[in-house]
Amino acid sequence: MVTILALETSCDETAAAVVSDRTVLSSVVASQIETHKRYGGIVPEVASREHVVTVGDAIATALDQSRLGWADIDGVAATCAPGLVGALMVGLTAGKTLAMVHNKPFLGVHHLEGHIYASYLADPDLQPPYLCLLVSGGHTSLIYVKDCGHYETLGQTRDDAAGEAFDKVARLLGLGYPGGPVMDRLAKEGNPKAFPLPEGNISLPGGGFHPYDSSFSGLKTAVLRLVERLRAEGVDPLPVADIAASFQETVARGLTKRAIACALDYGLPAIALGGGVAANSGLRQHLQEAAAEKGLKVMFPPLKLCTDNAAMIGCAAADHLNRGHRSPWSVGVQSRMPVTRVMELYGESQP
Ligand code: KG4
Ligand code: ZN
């Protein structure tokens, strides 16, 4: 068993946690949502500055709440890719500095591997292989989880992420930022069949559709055109709940169809969800029903583990450290990095 102090600053949450293998001893998440709300989205430079202000307190609180001291910590971890470069740099620099000062190994962690590890915190007995449906503000992926550090991306979005689509549609409906939770709430009062919308299938050159990839930009444009048409027809107020319900139904149906097909095609017995959109009630319902029908297990970690946090980063780092992995001091930040390249963070060159 190893105990990790972990940091996560890849986007708009400043997070610190202490984790022993798959047990969370403390987890602090300071959200910047209130700061970014006034801009209608995340401003990278503002995010970096906020991380600098908050990260010290987050670390001190996480250590304090864990009731452990530096003698009990076996390693320090920080998210180093992918994400906003300036934001990542704050956590990476703080983490490396602490590791050097206290003479501990340092582990740079891939953000998406962190999201995958949230499932182990929710179910410590979970074992690969399984499929992870990762749906957040920045990512929409179907990841084949083979082992610690070993992943294959089987499906992804060709344009916007699912959460980004929720945020953009909410914005055009005048619902504020972030849009997912308010759309979800409104959808419960609306008719999901009110407006048929395109599911965002990706056409293949030889005909047919890509079974696992998705697209959300066409769906977003379809909602825009719908709103324009209703306004031109003088519909006032707009049937916002029906639009939210129809949009959510379309996203949930498409994601569920692709995740179930992927798990069945690859013979994977379980689907674990991760990312903020995993909170969506429509997606949960669709996936649960479809999985039960096909005899697949589906896992929804609690929301506080689905959205960005440092506990998931600590859990991933603990598994790597238990296997003897550590990052070289030269490990840097990267705005983009596929999850298939995780082992490069521990000095292993890819085949
Ligand atoms: O995982 P996350 O906290 O941050 C990223 O790494 O992106 O995900 C945030 C995203 C936002 O786009 C937000 O609108 C969406 O998750 N979200 C939801 C819900 N709760 C959060 N989307 C749909 N339904 C929800 N209930
Ligand atoms: Zn994330």
Image (cartoon, helix red, strand yellow):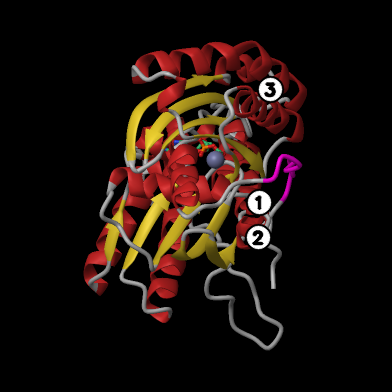
Residue 316, label in figure: none
Say what secondary structure mark 2 lies in: helix
Comes first in the chain, label 3 or label 1: 3
Task: Characterize the magenta stretch by its predominant secondary structure.
Answer: loop
Farthest bottom residue in view: 206
* Residue 329 is a magenta residue: yes
Mark 2 to mark 1: distance in Å?
8 Å
Q: Which mark is residue 345?
A: 1
Q: Write down the quadrant of residue 333 in the picture.
A: top right
Question: Is residue 315 part of the magenta span, yes or no?
Answer: no
Question: 10 Å neighbourhood of mark 1: few (<14), some, or many (≥20)?
Answer: many
Across and down, in percent, residue 60 comes to 49, 13
Q: Are marks 2 and 1 in contact (CB under 8 Å)?
A: yes
**Residue at 45% across, 73% down:** 262
Range shown magenta: 328-336
Q: Amino acid at mark 3?
A: Ala
Viewer-closest of 86 and 65: 65
Determine contact: label 3, label 1, CB under 8 Å.
no
Up/down of 38 relative to 7, above or below: above
* Residue at the disc numbered 3: 47
Q: In the rendered view of the protein, which quadrant contains the N terminus?
A: top left
Q: Position of residue 76 (x, y in %)?
A: 54, 33
Looking at the rendered structure, the secondary structure element under dot 3 is helix
Q: Is residue 30 above or below residue 142?
A: above
Q: Nearer the viewer, residue 338 or 349?
A: 349
Q: Quadrant of residue 101?
A: top right
Residue 238 visible here: no
The spot of residue 66 in percent (x, y) is: 35, 21
Q: CA distance from mark 3 to mark 1?
A: 24 Å
Q: Please give the residue where the numbered disc 2 appears in the rendered image.
A: 341
Identity of the residue drawn at 68% across and 55% down: 347
Q: Residue flagged by tag 1: what amino acid is it? A: Leu
